[in-house]
Amino acid sequence: GAVVSQHPSWVICKSGTSVKIECRSLDFQATTMFWYRQFPKQSLMLMATSNEGSKATYEQGVEKDKFLINHASLTLSTLTVTSAHPEDSSFYICSASGDRGLYEQYFGPGTRLTVT
Amino acid sequence: ILNVEQSPQSLHVQEGDSTNFTCSFPSSNFYALHWYRWETAKSPEALFVMTLNGDEKKKGRISATLNTKEGYSYLYIKGSQPEDSATYLCASLTTDSWGKLQFGAGTQVVVTP
């Protein structure tokens, strides 16, 4: 149980275009979803936290107008990278949490974004 | 310690050998410590969630210990197998983090036959 899918697994886009990444909890209801970004050899860095039906909370330094997060249902959250630039090239990974106890998070497999 | 740190960054292990590595985390306001196993091209898989000082958890050949007072956790792999090759992540949760995990950079384990 606790399976999270993420789509696409990799994407290449041209500078200036927008890219949408989907994160779905397949067998549980995710009250909270998290979006992370990872640069090579570095930790997963939290970008934002989203709760179903409410606005996402962004971490300091993350541009909310550039990284649009929508958590419209208990099973789906999307991250849209708007007007992508080469410096946005990175690995993006989502996780979902359905409990409020130990805050266990279940991760998707991640999306490799390359902006040319 | 303000950040979560893992050491070593990577290690190579001969099949059959045992190994261990460390996660250091902030000890103040401690709530829980998570361990994940992350194979290439797959989702990170939850191994353990640890909360109590002195706790030890085991899953097959993998076990972990926790010292919340000094802020460290060890992960042990007994009799390493090639399928144990993965990056092992730890993540700290504090009482004031509102459910947000703070991750270490991981220890990459490569088990060679």
Image: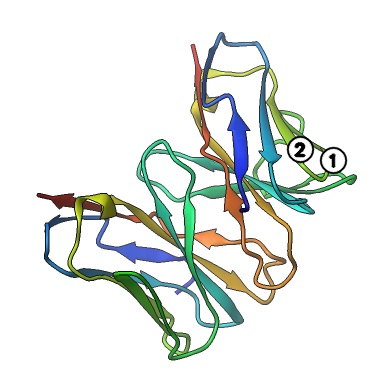
Of the numbered discs in the image, which one, if any, rests on residue A73? 1
**Residue A13 spot, x, y in % from top left:** 56, 12
Residue sitting nearer the eye, A13 or B49: B49
Residue drawn at point x = 12 percent, y = 66 percent:
B17
Of the numbered discs in the image, which one, if any, rests on residue A40? none
Residue drawn at point x = 79 percent, y = 54 percent:
A31
Is the Cβ of the residue at disc 1 closer than 8 Å to that at disc 2? yes
Q: Which residue of the protein is positioned furthest toward the top in this rendering?
A: A14
Disc 2: which chain?
A: A
Graded by Cα atoms within 10 Å as few (under 14), some (14 to 19) or many (20 or more), the crowding at tag 2 reads: many
Graded by Cα atoms within 10 Å as few (under 14), some (14 to 19) or many (20 or more), the crowding at tag 1 reads: some
What separation in Å lies between label 1 and label 2 (alpha carbons)? Answer: 5 Å
Q: Are marks 1 and 2 on the same chain?
A: yes
**Residue A53 spot, x, y in % from top left:** 90, 44
**Residue B20 spot, x, y in % from top left:** 24, 70
Which element type, helix, strand or loop, lies under badge 2? Answer: strand
Q: Quadrant of residue B101?
A: bottom right
Residue drawn at point x = 68 percent, y = 16 percent:
A18
Which element type, helix, strand or loop, lies under badge 1? Answer: strand
Disc 1: which chain?
A: A
Q: Which quadrant is the N terminus of chain B positioned in?
A: bottom left
Instruction: Determine whether, in the image, residue A66 is placed left or right of residue B65.
Output: right
**Residue A25 spot, x, y in % from top left:** 69, 43
Q: Which residue is mark 2?
A: A76
Give amino acid for label 2: Leu
